[in-house]
Amino acid sequence: MSRPQQVARPIVRSLQQSRSITVCPSRSIAARQFSTTANRKDEGTTVEQQPRASATQRLSDTLSGSHWTPEQLEKLTSHTMGSRRRRAAIATSSDIPFEQMPYQCFQEARKILNEDRQEKIAQIVAETEKIKHLEAADASTMRGGEPYKQKRLESLRKYVEELKILADINDPLVKRRFEDGMGDMNKPIYRYLADRKWRSMDYKITVQRINQFHIVPDVLPKFDPTMDVKLSFRGQPIAPGATLNSRVTEVAPTLKMQVFDAGTRLLSVVVLDADVPDLESDFFTRRCHYLATNIPWDPTKKQLPLRQIGTPTSQTGGDLAVPWLPPFAQKGSPYHRLAVFVLEHNANEKIDVTKLTERYDGSGRELFSLKGLRDKFKLKVAGFSIFRTEWDENTAAVMERHGILGADVEFKQQHFKSLKGPRKARGWEAKRQKPKYRSLWKYTKRLA
Amino acid sequence: MSFPFNLRGLASRLLNLSRPIQTTTAPSASRCLSTTSPLLNTPKGGKKPQSGGAASGKKRGKGKNAVVQDPKIVNLLQSLSTLSPRRIPPPLRMARNRHLRHWTIHRGWLMFRRKQRDERERTFMKQYQSMSAACEELRLTRGPGARPEGYLYRVAMEKKGVYGHHGVPIEYARAQTDTPAKVAWNHDWKR
């Protein structure tokens, strides 16, 4: 058994050494090989001008999650707490960047990963050269002609994108930045990680909702979401498919949207009720509750407050075609599925809002067809979310406030009389009503 | 890094589930894990039963024989014993920086192995191709002396000693039969 001082001594020594290295900023930058982007601590050009982060700040960076109160962090970083070894480590290792931590195995691993990264970068350069060369070449000299050239270019570009992801995927700082939500969505690696995270759970839930609520085939013949859409009403995030109170849904929701492919595109947002009861045909029809279009969107954008679209103070841009109609379900009707669809415009072409308004606003809300909209304006359905609404204690008030008629209507199940005659009474008592069982009448007559 | 749900302790939880079954078989025993079989708890004076027979279950270790009589439960516990905390190591619990270092080392190790594997495969491929080229060269060579073209290749392809000394491939150990036929079904056959 060795005493704690003996154990801690080499660690402290190594920490002190590495500290003396980090004092010189130029050397610290030279020693930093693997990080792709600037370190969080020296995000600027030089290290010295940056104010030193406090110990609490540094520790809060290292501890994941935001469940630590400032008092707890203070306690964790205090120099009087913990073992001698821990105190010594905290006192002497003030400013070692994460990637310079003096752990041998860690450093060896970084060396291997760095080599691989350099290889990938060299490959990217080579492939880019190839692309340039091919672009400059005349297609008529190739055996496949122009289609061959285009196909080859496309596959080369795809390969370069793959290589860009592979070059950065082993970087612990990239992983950390992504987990903190600080990743720059313009870079392919963060988009890739976000896509992977979305597909690991949220996408599966969305697909499950599409199937179990029969959005396919009730609203669309087939549909696979490619972007992340989350709903929140009044700042509260909503689980997909939740049944909401009509007072909550009185104002339009905020969409939290994330696209995973590069570039700016134009989006349209449609909210439709897929379960409007239709008494004439004894069936259900659809109604458009909201329609906005020409919303510019790129991977760095996160939030889209639907009620701000079309107002002069709108931050996001876009045009409002059909304003928000609060979802309502009359008494006795089964729950209504309110589906939120996000559609992508074809080749970033703007849609004429007046055309949409005259087509879908007012009486055009009823008998709304998403498939019709999609086909008419050549849109691509990309994102989906859903909530449900039922008759509740606030529905009548909401309908009155927004001038919607029909709050007094109650749907009832239609009952059909049986064509068979009434059935004879059966059972032990019924059988013993006859005079034959006179002795049992005290048990069978005038019960209770 | 952590499992989606914790398998550790599943077996012990199931063991607890089987508690009511124990109490029904031995209503007097209030201890769930009694060290002695319920039959032994009879008041003194009575004769000690002879080893309990099949009903008392198997004795495990010294002094610890769980009274699980139902063979279904015994089977279930045996098959679930792989999920016991003894078999499954606990999930790695680390602070963030440490976990990131761990992750880096893990990725580095995977990368190292991949590099090694690729290198080996490349070597094998090169060797195979050079062998193939050498054989092709042999096939096109006119023999030593008056031997015809390809003689050296045929000699090189002989499998003498490959299947052991004077051995034959194991496929030839089968008794040679008429069936299965070379043509599986004769469609033109007419009586």
Image (cartoon, helix red, strand yellow):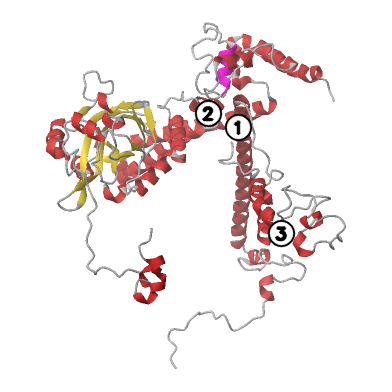
Q: Amino acid at mark 2?
A: Lys
Q: Amino acid at mark 3?
A: Gln
Q: Vertical placement of A232 versus A214: above or below?
A: above
Which residue in the protein does label 3 denote?
A: B69
Q: Is residue A59 magenta?
A: yes
* Left/right of residue A183 with respect to residue A366 in the rendered view: right
How far is disc 1 from disc 3 in space, using C-alphas? 46 Å
Instruction: Name the spot of residue B173 as percent of width and height, x first.
Output: 69, 75
Task: Determine whether the residue tagged by mark 3 lies in a helix, strand or loop.
Answer: loop
How far is disc 2 from disc 3 in space, using C-alphas? 52 Å
Q: Camera-side residue: B186 or A104? A: A104
Q: Picture quarter containing residue B98? A: top right
* Left/right of residue A120 with respect to residue A220 in the rendered view: right
Q: Is residue A431 magenta?
A: no
Q: Picture quarter containing residue A135? A: top left
How far is disc 1 from disc 2 in space, using C-alphas? 10 Å
Task: Determine whether the residue tagged by mark 1 lies in a helix, strand or loop.
Answer: helix
Residue B103 is tagged as: 1
- State which chain disc 2 sits on: A
Labels 2 and 3 positioned on one and the same chain: no
Residue A292 is tagged as: none
Q: Picture quarter containing residue A241? A: top left
Instruction: Name the spot of residue B45 as percent of width and height, x first.
Output: 88, 57
- State which chain disc 1 sits on: B
